[in-house]
Amino acid sequence: MRLALLGAPGSGKGTQAMLLEAKYGFVHISTGHILRKNLREKTELGLRAKPFMQEGELVPNDIVVEMVKERLSHDDAVAGFLMDGFPRDILQAEAFERILDEMGRPLDVVVLLKIDDELVVKRLTNRRTCRACGKILNLLGLHAGAKFCPDCGGGLYHRDDDSEPVIRNRIEVYREHSEPLAGWYEARGLLRTVEVEEYYMPEDTFRRIEAALDL
Ligand code: AMP
């Protein structure tokens, strides 16, 4: 299956992508993850992307589109993929469509995770990620006070761009650039919408995604 996950920052795209990958073996491609890896390794791409990421702005399209094209050329993406965090605007969606058409592998479905803005702020200020296995935790619920990953014991960190002013900017950027994607994909008959509710566990949203995808 060729699938893209859309949704505001903090809507749970990364968590849901990891659950889908674990259960169905989808190849998970996260542009945010690839960019953060480049940042850590101080590659030329990482150095170019850094000022945009620090402010919660979109990294320029030429960088991101090339990065996605390169990633899709790997053998593991031939059978299908799960795109997380891309496309982020209509120009990226158009470029994505062209790349996939050239490969003769169009998208099958797009899932939009719909969430309230204030819930996004609450979730992101309390979000922690495991340095070792990448698991994403929320300190508001089951994992209150956690210092280490419950799965592998790795240390947890708070992403630099999860501070409140940067979160607010990321929401603005989402509204302006990414929200119009829902209509764009709706017009192509590819969109499925899943509501994310405040007291949901990730497994509740996951079940809704499975139902939306007829899995
Ligand atoms: P994410 O992990 O998806 O929340 O992305 C973290 C940051 O990486 C974003 O705030 C952007 O600065 C950058 N980024 C990730 N994906 C994209 C994309 N498709 N286009 C532009 N910038 C992106």
Image (cartoon, rainbow, N blue to C red):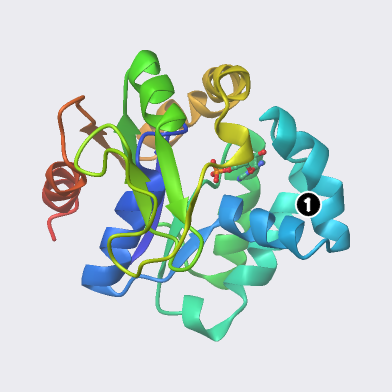
Residue displayed at 30% across by 75% down: 25
- Asked if the beta carbon under badge 1 is closer than 8 A to the nearest atom of ligand 1, the reply is yes
> Dot 1: few (<14), some (14–19), or many (≥20) neighbours within 10 Å?
some
Residue displayed at 86% across by 48% down: 48
Residue that sits furthest to the bottom in the current view: 75
Residue displayed at 27% across by 38% down: 144
**Whole-percent x, y for residue 108 in the image:** 35, 57
Q: Is residue 102 above or below residue 139?
A: below
Task: Determine the quadrant in which ligand 1 lies.
Answer: top right
Which residue is the site of mark 1?
A: 63
Q: Is residue 111 above or below residue 199?
A: below
**Kind of residue at disc 1:** Ile
Dividing the image into 4 quarters, which one contains the N terminus? bottom left
Tell me: 50 left or right of 162. right
Tell me: 74 left or right of 114. right
Q: Nearer the viewer, residue 52 or 159?
A: 159
